[in-house]
Image (tube, helix red, strand yellow):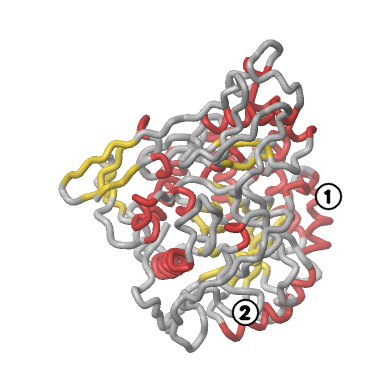
Amino acid sequence: MEPPLKLSVLPLLLFTACHVILLTTAYSIGVNYGTISDNLPPPSKVAAFLKTKTTIDRVKIFDANPDILRAFAGTNIAVTVTVGNGDVPALAKLSAAQSWVADNILPFHPRTTINRIAVGNEILATSDKDLIAHLLPAMKSLHSALELVNISSIQVGTPNSLGILAPNTGPPSEGRFRTGYDRVVFTPMLDFHRQTKSPFLINPYPFFGSVPETLNYALFKPNGGVFDNATGMNYTNMFDAQMDAVYTAMKKVGYEDVDVVVAETGWPSVGDPTQPDATVDNAASYNGNLIKHVSSGKGTPLMPNRTFETYIFALFNENLKPSKSEQNYGLFKPDFNPVYDVGILRNQQAAAPKSSVAAAPKSGVAAGPKSGVSEGPTSGGAQAPSPSAGKRWCVPRSDASDAALQKNIDFVCSSGVDCKPIQGGGPCFQPNTVKSHAAYVMNAYYQANGPQDSNCDFKHTGVVTTTDPSYDACTYPYKAEKSEKTVAGGSIKMKCDRMAGVFMILASCIVLI
């Protein structure tokens, strides 16, 4: 996955208590091969390792790196290549798409099995109107460019975060796309997928929807389940609930027949101070159970009897990611030793998980999950804010440009959010800087629309923080999260203020068995 962000929503089965899995059955499990690191082995060694030592049969990369594409030639490991977000607008023109295919596909195909082109990454979450407007045209142009050179084996799609769903979606049966995007964006996009027989790509991350009370539900550990009254289905894991919420949204616009691929999902083995559930044991449980679940053929309550093509995030720990958790999504260390074993190594039983020490954070652009702890906005004259346990605000990233932040202000203030506090005479007008004003309105939008991490992405210029950025008379909005515990019939019952996501936005709910 490219830069920072990840939603609040749902995932999979369970690793055995002793973490032992003997792999003798064949199934299709992929990994996201990110390279935001200065200590990774060369692509040739990576390809040889995956081919000879693991059962992984597909990878997704976040560019079209020629060294990686050459390395996977002849391995029969399928490779998904990615068009950078910034390249999407130009590719809406067929001539540009033809040039891109000539430069990035034809020199390697078919010796390297390229199975898919991912056009951008989580573009809808960027809120960039220009990118969003050019996304489907670029997808169509690339598909046409492939057809013109008689390539029919490479699909075209775009990965979507679960921020594409309407805020505060309740149980899966209430899943729907965001208003305004449902008919304008997703209906034509899904029609493209139907016509080209290509899948809809989604990035579910139960990690971002989990709280301590819902941890078993997120990890596929035993729990009473969550009952959806509308369908009569009982959900015993968050992943199924996330998948079915997307399926329901697709069905509501008439495209439930389009296949779904999990382009990204994972769990960090080390986390930031506010992420106590980011542990080796939990990462092993989630990913181990994920593999078993998506390969079982059981499917989900609303999509039964199916397997799901799934790409785990990520292959390696990447030491140049901006936060400790982002650095530690890897199944393997750079020396190919497993951080923990989920049963993908050939001809061996899984070993007990081993702890790994995260590298010190360094600056860099994330290619994976989007979450991090911000240093907070640089507001002049403000007293140093203090951490507030359990509360979250959205602020600009420290490296965000004023030009990008001004676009955020324009977008938010045209979306119906109250921007009066940053206007002249308002309590947040001073300091009169773009960054200070952007911090206030970005947080106001985040709180009004979730809050979910996807609503703080802003084309990778926003970040969620647990430090209250309020200062002097300027109070940043914070949506208090309420919970009500209900015990009934041995089944998990969940209630949230405003039904703010019984299944989807579990971070604002409390679950009790």
Using residue 431 as the reference point, say whether residue 486 is left or right of it.
left
Q: Is residue 455 visible?
A: no
Q: Is residue 417 visible?
A: yes
Could you tell me residue 85's position as x and y percent?
Answer: 72, 48
Viewer-proximal residue, 440 or 1? 440
Using residue 280 as the reference point, say whether residue 358 is left or right of it.
right
Compared with 68, 163 (above or below) is above
Viewer-proximal residue, 286 or 44? 286
Quadrant occupied by the N terminus:
bottom right
Labels 1, 2: front one: 2
Dot 2: element: loop
Q: Looking at the rendering, which quadrant does residue 66 occupy?
A: bottom right
Q: Residue at x 59, y 28 (%)?
A: 470
Q: Amino acid at mark 2?
A: Phe
Q: Looking at the rendering, which quadrant does residue 69 occupy?
A: bottom right
Q: Earlier in the sequence, mark 1 or mark 2?
A: 1
- Disc 1: which residue: 95
Q: Amino acid at mark 1?
A: Ser
- Disc 2: which residue: 336
Compared with 174, 476 (above or below) is above
Q: Label 2: few (<14), some or many (≥20) within 10 Å?
A: some
Could you tell me residue 232's position as x and y percent?
Answer: 24, 46
Q: CA distance from mark 1 to mark 2?
A: 41 Å
Could you tell me residue 325's position as x and y percent?
Answer: 58, 57
Q: Label 1: few (<14), some or many (≥20) within 10 Å?
A: some
Q: Looking at the rendering, which quadrant does residue 456 occupy?
A: top right
Using residue 240 as the reference point, say whether residue 98 is left or right of it.
right
